[in-house]
Image (cartoon, rainbow, N blue to C red):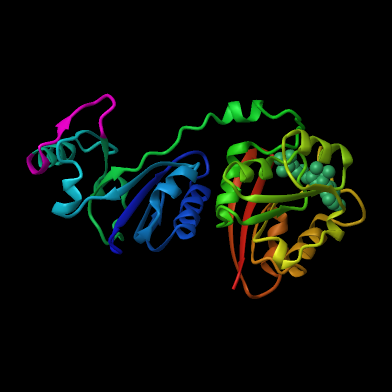
Amino acid sequence: MPINTRFFCIVGGKYPKLAREEITALLKTYGHLKIEYSMDNLVVAQGECKINKVARRAVYTKFIAREIQTEEDYSVLRGKTFSCFGTNDVELRKRVVEDIKKKTGAKVLLENPDCQIVIVSKSTGINSSASFTNLIGIRIPQPRIDWTKRLSQRKFFHPSMLEPRLCRAMVNLAQVKEGDTIVDPFCGTGGILVEAQEINIRTAGYDILKKMCLGAKQNMVENIAICDSLHIPLKPFIADAIITDIPYGRSTKIIRGQTRQQILKDLIDNTSVHKMVILCQKDDEDMIMKSRTNLKISICHLYRHKSLTRSMVTIMTW
Ligand SMILES: C[S@@+](CC[C@H](N)C(=O)[O-])C[C@H]1O[C@@H](n2cnc3c(N)ncnc32)[C@H](O)[C@@H]1O
């Protein structure tokens, strides 16, 4: 694939910033790209990328497309059927359809076409600061996952369990790939680890409660041990990333002497793991921002209900 290939991704869902960060992390995991634009519901990147792998993993991105610009890009549509979507600009859509028909002889088919063409028009979707105009691309297929079914398939359930889709996004944010190892020091029912295993990432999980560890094992999570987070052996060689959901509130309070902030301080200051994705509370942010200086920190707020907004913190050391 040429190095100047441009990809554009339309994100969706209730957490647009998290969705943009998730797709950006995946593009970086599987490619060498420059992010050209990241705003509202659109991310545009240029460079080399194993885009099919990105498309297989992204959970908060609705459409991923490879831009078609040159005659050669158009040639993949020759003799195929196609449909167009993604813009409300009817005139633009008509122009694109006619152009494709003329250049390639491809025919429009609304149900089950060979290719789907995604159009983002500058007038509706893109801020005026962008260096490009309309985007026209071929959609990269993504798997459809029934997240409700995935949750109901768990054998052991607890109210503190994170929803599977969010767990998968956390794994994606950590920029880990197949064969890497992640650790969850507060694994509970193993929600994050189940989702990591599903995409061939190795896992280790710890929880102070035996009941939770047994539950995680019932949920088919490997390498689970009962352990206080204070004593977890987080040596760099055992983990590529720490991904965790810090205990909070009534149903998942911290057990033993530490406060939530002490736990976070310990995690961030005393481990040599270079990538961390931590779901914590908004009032923990100050402590995180004041920790070690060689950290690149990014925070997304997740509104859960009127008295709870959680913070998804991605930390990379450099
Ligand atoms: C928010 S829950 C994790 C939920 C998990 N993400 C899931 O999907 O099931 C936090 C977990 O931390 C555990 N925990 C509390 N204090 C701990 C400590 N000092 N060391 C290790 N685990 C602890 C609790 O037992 C609880 O299961």
Give the quadrant of residue 99. Answer: top left
On the picture, is 25 further left or further right than 91?
right
Tell me the residue at 66%/51% (across/down).
Answer: 202
Give yes or no for residue 85 being in the magenta stretch: no
Q: Position of residue 156 (x, y in %)?
A: 76, 30
Q: How many marks?
A: 0
Give yes or no for residue 107 being in the magenta stretch: yes
Residue 2 seen in this snapshot = yes
Q: Position of residue 35 (x, y in %)?
A: 39, 61
Residue 250 seen in this snapshot = no
Q: Nearer the viewer, residue 46 or 249?
A: 46
Magenta stretch prevailing secondary structure: loop
Q: Quadrant of the N terminus?
A: bottom left
Give the quadrant of residue 63. Answer: top left
On the picture, is 14 further left or further right than 234?
left
Ligand 1 shows up in the quarter that is top right
Classify 197 as above or below 107. below
Tell me the residue at 36%/61% (across/down).
Answer: 48
Q: Nearer the viewer, residue 99 or 15?
A: 99
Classify 259 as above or below 237. above
Give the quadrant of residue 296. Answer: bottom right
Q: Position of residue 230 (x, y in %)?
A: 86, 59
Tell me the residue at 44%/49% (across/down).
Answer: 54
Bounds of the magenta segment: 102-114
Q: Nearer the viewer, residue 195 or 291?
A: 195
Tell me the residue at 48%/46% (across/down).
Answer: 16
Q: Nearer the viewer, residue 35 or 48?
A: 48
Q: Quadrant of the C terminus?
A: bottom right
On the picture, is 52 further left or further right than 88?
right
**Residue found at the far left of this picture:** 102
